[in-house]
Image (cartoon, rainbow, N blue to C red):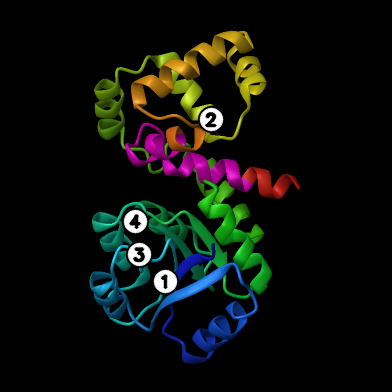
Amino acid sequence: MAIRIALVEDNPSLRKRFIDNFKYFQSIDLVIVSPTGEDFLNKMEQSSAQELPQVVLMDIELPGIDGIETTSRLKQSLPDIEVMMLTVFEQPDKIFSSLKAGAVGYMLKDESPANIVKAIEELLEGGAPMSRTIARKMIGLISSDPNLGEDSKLKDQAIQEYGLSEQEVKIIQRLVDGNNYLGIAEGLFISPHTVKTHIKNIYRKLHVHSRASAVKLAIDKKIVGMVSLVLAAAVKLLSV
């Protein structure tokens, strides 16, 4: 089944280019096209559940409310819809503001159509796709401030709500970073069997049944920061 996407782009020529390019991909179903954030949010309100996009490709510099504020408003009402920023900007403040608003992917507009589609698919699989130049910016940004974007109050509240131990939080962090059981075991100096036991308990406490669901809930509830996932994705991308 095709992935339903929305495109929010104010530049007419770029908007047309994206529309024309997506016609060549059967895996993509462009259900909403908007030139402004206001128009997009209005169309979302008028759409049925079956018509809503799964992924939104969001321009940052929009007339009226910008793409970051549009993303923030969208995530408040429809938190399960994924947002990927499409931009010509690489500034660290734009990247971080987008993350805080709820965006996960961050791609430059000059990426090939195939790369954009690949990024959309990766996003739905729980990844945090980004262009290589943005990945470098992100690593530099977080390296300068390791606690960037963390909300310790919300994190503490979530840990208490779910009754997570310190060790379980460390394991969740490593799940978000993409580690397998063996990698987690080696990093925490425990056995793989102990890791499996901890993960079983984590699933039970979070009321989930898969790694992807655990990671999503951990990020949504601020048990770990969204920045952590993006940093892991950036390191993985640049190591290829």
Q: Amino acid at mark 4?
A: Ala
Q: Amino acid at mark 2?
A: Leu
Q: Residue at x 55, y 15 (%)?
A: 196
Which numbered disc flags the more N-terminal residue, 1 or 4? 1
Residue that mark 1 sits on: 60
Marks 4, 3: nearer the viewer: 3
Residue that mark 2 sits on: 175
Find the distance from the CA under tag 1 to the CA under tag 4. Answer: 12 Å
Q: Residue furthest bottom?
A: 13
Marks 2, 3: nearer the viewer: 3
Q: Tell me if residue 226 comes above or below residue 162 in the rendering.
A: below
Residue that mark 3 sits on: 50
- Disc 3, disc 1: CB below 8 Å? no
Q: Residue at x 31, y 68 (%)?
A: 70
Which numbered disc flags the more N-terminal residue, 3 or 1? 3
Per the rendered image, the range of residues in magenta is 215-234
Secondary structure type for disc 2: helix
Q: Residue at x 35, y 64 (%)?
A: 50
| In magenta segment, residue 202 | no
Can residue 60 be seen in the rendering of this structure?
A: yes
Secondary structure type for disc 1: loop
Front residue (pair 9, 122): 122
Can residue 130 be seen in the rendering of this structure?
A: no
Secondary structure type for disc 3: loop
